[in-house]
Image: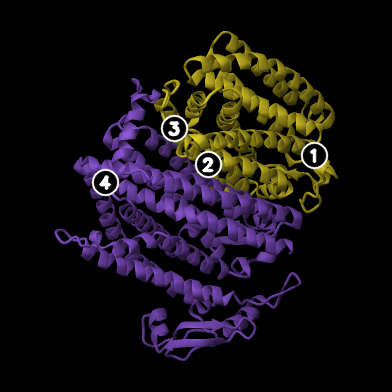
Chain colours: A purple, B yellow
Amino acid sequence: MNVLSLARFQFAMTTIFHFFFVPFTIGTIFVVAIMESMYVHTGNPNYRKMTKFWGNVFLLTFAVGVVTGLIQEFQFGMNWSDYSRFMGDIFGAPLAFEALLSFFIESTFIGLWLFTWDRVKKGLHLFFAWMIVFGTLTSALWILTANSFMQHPVGFSIRGGRAVMVDFGALLSNRQLLYEYTHVIFGALLTGATILTGLAAFQLLKKRSISDVNKKIYHKTIRLGLVLMLIFSSCEFVAGDFQMRYLVHEQPMKFAAAEGVTTTTGEKAPWTVVGYVDPKTHDIKGNIDIPDVLSILSYHKTTGAVTGMKEVNKQLEKRYGTKIDNHKMDYYVPANTLFWSFRVMCGFAALLFLVSIVGLIMTRKGKESLYSHRWCLWVLAILTFSPFIVNTAGWLITELGRYPWTVYGLFTIAQSVSPSVSATSLLISNIVYFSLFTILAIVMIALTVRFLRNDPEEWEKAGDEKRATDPFAKGAF
Amino acid sequence: MSASVLQILWFILLAVLFSGFFFLDGFDFGVGMAVKTLAYNDAERTQIVRTIGPVWDGNEVWLITAGGAMFASFPYWYATLFSGYYIILLIILVGLIIRGVSFEFRSKSSAAHRHIWDNIMAIGSFLVPFFFGIMFISMIKGMPIDANGNIYGHFFDYINWFSVVGGVALTLLCYLHGLNYITLKTKGVISDRAQNYAHALYWVLYVGEVIFALLLFFQTDFLKVHPILTLICLALIVGFSVAAHVSTFKNKQGIALTFSGLTLISLVALIFCGLFPRVMISSISSKYDLMIQSASSSNYTLVVMTIATVILVPCVLAYTIWAYWIFRKRIAMPKIGEVK
């Protein structure tokens, strides 16, 4: 095991684990803020119970999201110090803004939101919730500004062996950022809606006796969740479509691998449904094709050729050379991972879309048949886990598809790694993180399951009793 | 070539951010350690954890901001420091992670399991200031930085008498800062006990400060490079410690907390003043020192960052102060049978 592969493994492990929680928190707090808005708007106390109950699920995940995010900031310097030297001038600023603008807002307003129920005016408390949403949404914007630069560098020049920012506006108006941000945000919101719907279904499934209020709250959660799932999965199709059609030109290797195009197609490009790309010969095997569809997907026209991986590789070799810093280069990406991740991602998105439509029909006013069919609830409940798979698949495509670059066309992964860090140090940190993540995940799940033994109605009552003895209450507000 | 105004401004701003971190998160670490050392029972532990419940996360963001700002304004410093202090930073990260989740997990777990999270909170709260002390103090002593800005250090470059004394001193400062915070923010026996602990521990701190000052004199070039500034900072550290100590005797709780915070800030000031105009000192040769002017980002990036900071930092300070104002009441002991 060498330093480079250990560092890459660590980056993959820590970002994937971190990204389990990021879209979860962005999505759930958004849905929770909508619930609280409904409470403030209607004054119906059930919405308040609902907000508090699901808000607690959000808080549990947020803590893990924060601490795993710390690793991200440190690891650029620890494992990728030459990358930090090359890119710091551009990469650091968005990170600093993320902390200054978003993290301070998130952390402060979560404290305020959590500890001031019934002690400030309803409207102000709702404002706290939306401030958290604002914090999470802007946080994603800054980190994706940095990531978009890595995918598609703009507004820079190379000076003294490093990339230097010359136009901050160009970084923000990067087209890559526009597509990537909308894609990630709609994905995160879809994640939140799907998970809360699924957890509500779980609650209905496992409770033998359940009070009318709780039942109403879970039904409302499912209904609201399904509406949001429909909206966000539709938006996600549009965002994904824009991003893929952008990739055809900007990162043709990523596109070709995601669609399994090995040799350049004719004017009428067939779409490969399934197949296997031989990693040695770069030929596709066992593929099932549907004629013309890829042209339609790529260009929204019935004709249009798609360049295959082999030709793209030749073009890139011509452009960037076959040797960088004495490393022999080729520009192939892990095609099967991209190909199958893409199928998993799109497949689940389509599934969530269909489920939300059927679900909405089955929960329409007066004809609410969904809740009486246990298998329907099971479908929703099992789908709770799907966003984690889909989000991971999406990032695998984005990040592996950039191979062999850290900054596309400018700086390779091999150039980025810390020269002074030993394989032993990296091995130790990998083991430490892996163990820590395993423990965190187990505890997280156990505590969430434990929390879900409660129901919204009793949960609020317990909270009220607690507050009667709460030190903050006494004339503090 | 000497450093530009903007470069010096960002060097100072980094010092400000680290000061904010140690002033605010400093007492969080102290409170975290006090969970196992000051409280006698579960009710008392809950009482003192609550004093930082709504604010600890925001306090930690000062560290994230300082890290991000260092990456953005001095990428070469960030790269050398973070890759050079690999294992130390790994331990700090582990400390921050286990401490960070313990707040939320503690309140969600059953009474039987809560003591596990209390232990974890205390261990994490100890690891972070101790190893930050080790890192900063070994850094000002000088590290084997080569011509490419990489550190190939041995065990004793990181762990030596000077850095261990620094680590202990910083931990003690945070602990005292936390005791002062608990004294101010709680009611009843725990407040008195925290104050009594502080009375006694300040005598230990003085011993530590004297040893630290002597080692600083022999192990660094601070007195040669900036004799006046260094002596002023040392005098401030001792002066603020005494002032905090006297304030605890006079039961001026808020003032004691302010002075213990200022002690921490003076320590940060000492480090940054002594380093100037360097950011990292090479023990191999002074030509390999990382300098402010060569380690920094381009002028354009610094301008962008300055504009954003000028706009955002006043907002951050405003709503942080507002949040502390909302949570200004003292915390009483929770009633028997109360969960959480």
Q: CA distance from mark 2 to mark 1?
A: 35 Å
In space, the residues marked 4 and 1 are separated at their CA atoms by 63 Å
Residue in the image at 57% along x and 15% along y? B193
Mark 3 or mark 2: whose residue is earlier in sequence: 2
Q: Which type of secondary structure does the marked residue at label 2 adopt?
A: helix
Mark 3 to mark 1 CA distance (whole Å): 46 Å
Residue at numbered disc 4: A214
- Which residue is the site of mark 1? B142
Mark 2 vs mark 4, CA separation in Å? 29 Å
Q: Nearer the viewer, mark 3 or mark 1?
A: 3
Q: Around disc 2, counting alpha carbons within 10 Å, would you say few (fewer than 14), some (14 to 19), or many (20 or more)?
A: many
Query: How many C-alpha atoms fall within 10 Å of the one at disc 4: few (<14), some, or many (≥20)?
Result: some
Going from N to C along the chain, the mark reached first, 3 or 1, is 1
Residue type at mark 2 is Val
Residue at the farthest top position:
B250
- Residue A237: image location, x then y, percent: 36, 69
**Residue tagged by mark 2?**
B101
Q: Position of residue B25 (x, y in %)?
A: 56, 32
- The chain to which mark 4 is attached is A
Confirm whether residue A439 shows in the render: yes
Tell me the subunit letter for badge 2: B
Name the residue nearer the viewer: A371 or A249. A371
Disc 3 marks a residue whose amino acid type is Lys
Q: Which residue was labeled with disc 3?
A: B340
Q: Which image quarter is the N terminus of chain B in? A: top right
For badge 1, the amino acid type reads Gly
Crowdedness of circle 1 by 10 Å Cα count: few (<14), some, many (20+)?
many
Going by the numbered disc 4, the residue's amino acid type is Asn
The kind of secondary structure element at disc 3 is loop
